[in-house]
Image (tube, rainbow, N blue to C red):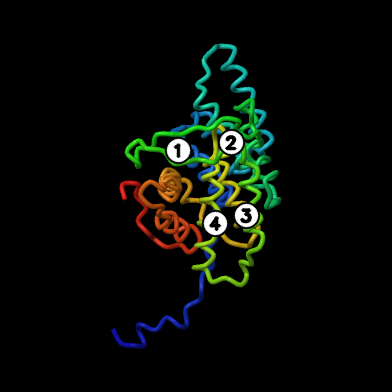
Amino acid sequence: MSEKELDSSMNFYQEEVKPKGYKKQLQWDMAIGLQEVDNLKPSKYLKQISEKNVLGQLSLEEVEQSLKKYYIEKDKRDSINHNELECDFVSMRIVELLEKDNFDLSVDYLKYIHKYLFQDVYELAGEFRNVDFSKHEKILNNDSVTYGDCKTLTESLEYDIAMEKDKNYKDMTIVEVIKNITDFSSNIWQVHPFREGNTRTTAVFIEKYLISLGYTVNNSLFKDKSVYFRNALVRGNYLNIKEDKSYLIKFYENLLLGKNNNLHSEE
């Protein structure tokens, strides 16, 4: 072909139009995918009504009403799968929170997120633990991360958040942004202030924070790589060898820069 035949300069640009419900679908994908950190799967019913929400056939309020009615009937028949119940309600609450245009960089807001997400599941939703614990981690050969002291949870978080408030992300390069958000999310998660649901709470807290700072977040990562995200947090806080946040940095590079780092927990 000649140069003239290969010249596309006269062709018109075609605007790419996202399908209806595209943003809502990404929110549901993130919300349901994030439940994988605790090996939770949604019910078939949630899949049905979430699809209707994406298509605009059901509002979130109607999704909530339908889900509650569904589990009331399941309870009457004594046929509740509690893992599905937790996955369904927490996923729905995540989508609700992502729809809300609010964020506050504070300990109280972190508590608010936990209470909101787990209000249908845990009696102690939104309350800090009063015991110390450990957890066997497969990627640490069944060793555990050292979590925050239950007596100083609030003080530890207030310190981390105070340090964060002193930062000016507008003056940072994107590399510096990723380094800082990696450190901050890692520190918040390491405190592990709640008995359950710390990774899911941290993920929503950080996503809301990034959105408040004006960044676009790639929700598909939480759909497909939530287990990697948790394992990267574990590895980044394991001091018995040496903490290594490089895996978490790879995650945030993909999340914020659209990079294509291989994210495999086997690493």
User: Residue at 61% of width from left, 27% of height from top?
Assistant: 122
Q: Position of residue 92 (x, y in %)?
A: 60, 37
Q: CA distance from mark 2 to mark 1?
A: 26 Å
User: Residue at 53% of width from left, 45% of height from top?
Assistant: 189
- Residue 110 appears anywhere in the view: yes
Neighbourhood count class around disc 2 (C-alpha, 10 Å): few under 14, some 14–19, many 20 upward: some
Q: Mark 2: which amino acid?
A: Cys
Answer with mark 4 or mark 3, whichever residue precedes in sequence.
3
Q: Residue furthest bottom?
A: 3
Residue located beneath label 2 in the image = 150
**Is residue 74 positioned above or below 251 on the image?**
above
Residue located beneath label 4 in the image = 217
Q: 236 or 37, which lies in front?
A: 236
Q: Position of residue 95 (x, y in %)?
A: 61, 42
Image quadrant for the N terminus?
A: bottom left
Numbered disc 1: secondary structure: helix
